[in-house]
Amino acid sequence: MATTMALPTQSSAADARSDRTTNILSISEVRWAAVSFALFLLGLALQLSSAPEWMFWAAYLACYVAGGWEPALVGLQALRSKTLDVDLLMIVAAIGAAGIGQIFDGALLIVIFATSGALEAALTQRTADSVRGLLALAPEQAVRIDERGVETTVNAAELRIGDTIVVRPGERIGGDGVVTAGASEVDQQTITGESVPAPKRPGEEVYAGTTNGTGALTVEVSRDPSDTVIARIVAMVDDASLTKAKTQLFIERVEQYYSSIVVTATIAIFVIPLLFGADGQSALLRAMTFMIVASPCAVVLATMPPLLAAMATAARNGVLVKSAVVMEQLRNVDVVAFDKTGTITEGRPRVHTVRTLPDGDVDPVEILALAAAVERRSEHPLAAAIMTAAQLQAVSVPTATDFDSAPGIGVHGRVQGQRIDVVRPHGRLPVGATEVVAELERAGLTAVLVSTDDVAIGVIGLVDTIRADSERAVVELSTLTGRTPLLLSGDNSTLATTIANSVGISDIRSGLLPGDKADAVAALQRDGRSVLVVGDGVNDAPALATAHTGIAMGRKGSDLTLDTADAVLIRDELAALPNLMRLSRRAHRVVVANLVIAASFIITLVMWDLTATLPLPLGVAGHESSTVIVALNGMRLLSQRAWSGPNR
């Protein structure tokens, strides 16, 4: 697959037809599975209500048709390719069950396979949709300006390196480039994960798909549209998703061998006795008995239902796991990587401290009141944090007039005749202010300078809010995996280190773009690690797609991240992660136990059928007993104890 992807403004007609066809097929599988399940329930109800036999047989046979036509088609296609798979074996076993009067067994097998196929189709469709959805992050159009100053609206895909574009307040930036004129603050959380908009002035880089603030920018395009950061994110997510799609459950990896053995053995059991003069009817009965007792009903119930039960328990406790494969893989995780903003932290800055400067001689409460008065009309995240702090401390906020803002710098206004400036520290600062600002920034805080009539009176230090359960999650995950989690952040080293150290993380990778995060995950995988990545933003999507398992924050996670992730923390509770991994390990133990039970029954019944005469009713009873036992064993994972029980 190519490592870059163009960003078209609209899909081609062929692509559109392909997308619609895939959607239709996915919806069709889900609908047929639902119809098959409904018919199975109808047949069961009729059978239990002592209805005439032909009625529940009709319902079960309809269930066969609704849920079995597609596996039968897949099995026949595989057969044409000279391979046997479990789909065909399931259909033959179901027909064989009906042939000897065990219609219920066959219908149950059909329902299980139809449901599994529908879930797989739906998940595959969501993966494709997530990649296409990312294209919407980049604007379709940009305003290009020529040497004469004439502005022309063009498709963003038509931009070329060296073109100059104009980005007005509130617009999305049309291409990766360098600011040549103007000043503003750009919300680039989708790319870097920074919780605070970044100030942009001439000479600084901007990215396609990020949102301009209140100023106007002139940008010289420095990358082709097919090579922008957002385009590379698309390619990385798509490529990684296709790679991960090859992962299968263990039972699926051995189904080819099992199917071949059972079919070959069934034919042999029927044919060999005939060659030695055995009665045809008795040989057929023995072969059909073998087919029934060797059919993997219990094996299918041994694997998928316990994992589905674990998924249901996880969902009840705030974690949506998207597939049984994911639930199985979580047990293997031996290193966890966290995003910072919106994951370890809440992605919402708050006032941490207010410091008075010597020249100001103003107490911290008044500094906060003056800053809040001017910031009241600003929509900046830092302004919201200052206003919230003033409200929480019940500070009396005066009225400001003559409000104005300087993009990329700050805001100012007048309070009781004084000019009040609330700005990012820049240029030459007073000695006292320089020391305080440097101290706060070393501590990982964002510093805001407050001045009255051009005299610096104080500095407000703001910090992102750390989630209450972050430290607990880090400690428990360290115990479970044997390795302390690491932090992957787009923020600067000082800020990332401060946040990481506060929750007990010592392995810190900072200043990372989306591709760098994915590369860091890939490096861990090359070292033999099974990596779990937890994130919330579009910039985390490539890392989530690359990792063995990706988990998204549900409340503030971007649409792309939610679709790309293998699981979602619905309530954004990081403390659920250790419980989820423990649940996965419990589910694996149940699956192994179930497989042992199912294999023991199958081997015993098969050996009995081959070495003696296994009465058909006894064979069916044994087969049904194994099915019931593994089903009940799997249902134990529905209990709350499976989620919150002791760590084993």
Image: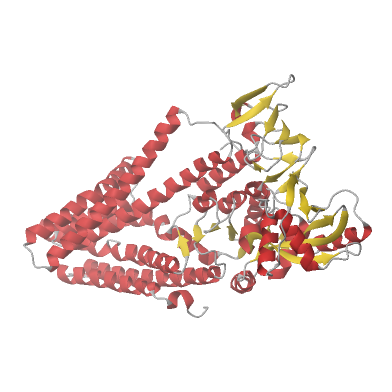
Identify which residue, 442 or 586, lies in the foreground: 442
Q: Quick one: which residue is furthest to the front in this view?
A: 416
Q: Is residue 516 left or right of residue 422?
A: left
Q: Position of residue 57 (x, y in %)?
A: 12, 58
Residue at x-position 72% and y-position 60%:
398
Q: Is residue 188 left or right of residue 7?
A: right
Q: Is residue 272 left or right of residue 338?
A: left
Give the number of callouts.
0
* Residue 194 visible to the viewer: yes
Q: Position of residue 368 (x, y in %)?
A: 75, 63
Residue at x-position 14% and y-position 68%:
48
* Residue 287 visible to the viewer: no
Q: Quick one: which residue is furthest to the top in this view?
A: 148
- Identify the coloring: secondary structure
Q: Is residue 397 above or below residue 585?
A: above
Q: Position of residue 444 (x, y in %)?
A: 77, 62
Residue 625 figure quarter: bottom left
Residue at x-position 62% and y-position 49%:
539
Quadrant of the image for the N terminus? top right
Identify which residue, 615 or 4, lies in the foreground: 4
Q: Position of residue 350 (x, y in %)?
A: 69, 63
Q: Quick one: which residue is furthest to the right in this view?
A: 431
Q: Is residue 315 above or below residue 227?
A: below
Q: Quick one: which residue is furthest to the bottom in this view?
A: 646
Residue 394 figure quarter: bottom right
Identify which residue, 613 or 337, lies in the foreground: 337
